[in-house]
Image: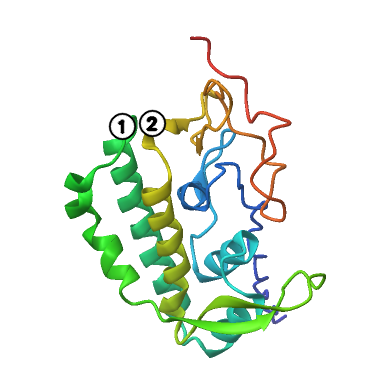
């Protein structure tokens, strides 16, 4: 009796939980795109699909642009861009760790050359449009960006990192004190008393301003 060979059943793609946006700054949220909020490490941009999903949740790229780039990308191209994003993330994490606890000065500019090189690739332009809220009467000047290739997905990330460098005080950067949590955030509380991140229930669909639950109990001082 001839045995019919078994058909291999395709394994379903691993589902990631919603990304976490608890840092109160999109630049630091990008660093938190890999984290251990409880006890299992999660990398939300481990591949091209993950990068597209994270950018959509972060609202850094218009949905139409993301879909267009998904369709036009060559095989493996988005995965390559995701690898570049991860390298950028870890470079910036090293920069943060080196300077956290003190304000930046002009002497630190030399270390930011990789970020400036990324910003030089940007293609922004202005466009006069109707007010986006649909309530106000009149027009506004809005900054737009050309999404020519999958590598352009790195540009809004670079802008978020640059804004953090120029607008935030590194003395307010903190790491969550949860025993296993690796998330970092900007402490904007009165007296700079915040000690932990919020829980994984906070997702990209809401502003990064919730503080109703902690990811884990903070360590005792």
Residue 96, by quadrant, is top left
Say which element carries label 1. Answer: loop
Residue behind mark 1: 102
Residue 98, by quadrant, is top left
Residue behind mark 2: 171
* Residue 67, percent from left and from top: 62, 81
For residue 76, say whether it is visible.
Answer: no
Q: CA distance from mark 2 to mark 1?
A: 5 Å
Quadrant (top left, top right, bottom left, bottom right) of the N terminus: bottom right
Say which element carries label 2. Answer: helix
* Residue 7, percent from left and from top: 67, 76
Residue at 64 percent across and 46 percent down: it is 208
Q: Name the residue nearer the viewer: 172 or 118.
A: 172
Answer left or right for 207 relative to 25. Answer: right
Residue at 53 percent across and 10 percent down: it is 220
Residue at 59 percent across and 33 percent down: it is 197
Contact flag, marks 2 and 1 (Cβ < 8 Å): yes
- Above or below residue 32? Residue 80 is below
């Amino acid at each position: 009796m001839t045995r019919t060979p078994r058909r291999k059943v395709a394994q379903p793609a691993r589902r990631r939980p919603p990304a976490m946006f608890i840092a109160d700054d999109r630049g630091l949220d990008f660093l938190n795109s890999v984290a251990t909020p409880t006890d299992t490490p999660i990398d939300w941009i481990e591949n091209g699909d993950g990068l597209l999903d994270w950018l959509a949740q972060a609202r850094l790229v218009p949905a139409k642009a993301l879909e267009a780039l998904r369709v036009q990308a060559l095989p493996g191209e988005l995965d390559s861009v995701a690898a570049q994003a991860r390298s950028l993330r870890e470079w910036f994490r090293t920069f943060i760790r080196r300077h956290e606890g003190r304000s930046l000065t002009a002497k630190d500019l030399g270390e930011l050359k990789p970020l400036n090189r990324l910003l030089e690739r940007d293609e922004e332009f202005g466009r006069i449009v109707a007010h986006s809220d649909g309530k106000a009467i009149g027009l506004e000047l809005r900054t737009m960006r050309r999404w020519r290739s999958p590598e352009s997905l790195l540009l809004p990330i670079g802008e978020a990192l640059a804004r953090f460098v120029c607008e935030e005080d590194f003395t307010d950067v903190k790491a969550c004190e949860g025993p296993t949590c690796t998330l970092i955030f900007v402490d904007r509380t009165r007296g700079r008393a915040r000690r932990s991140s919020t829980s994984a229930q906070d997702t990209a669909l809401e502003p990064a301003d919730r503080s109703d639950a902690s990811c884990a109990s903070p360590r005792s001082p």
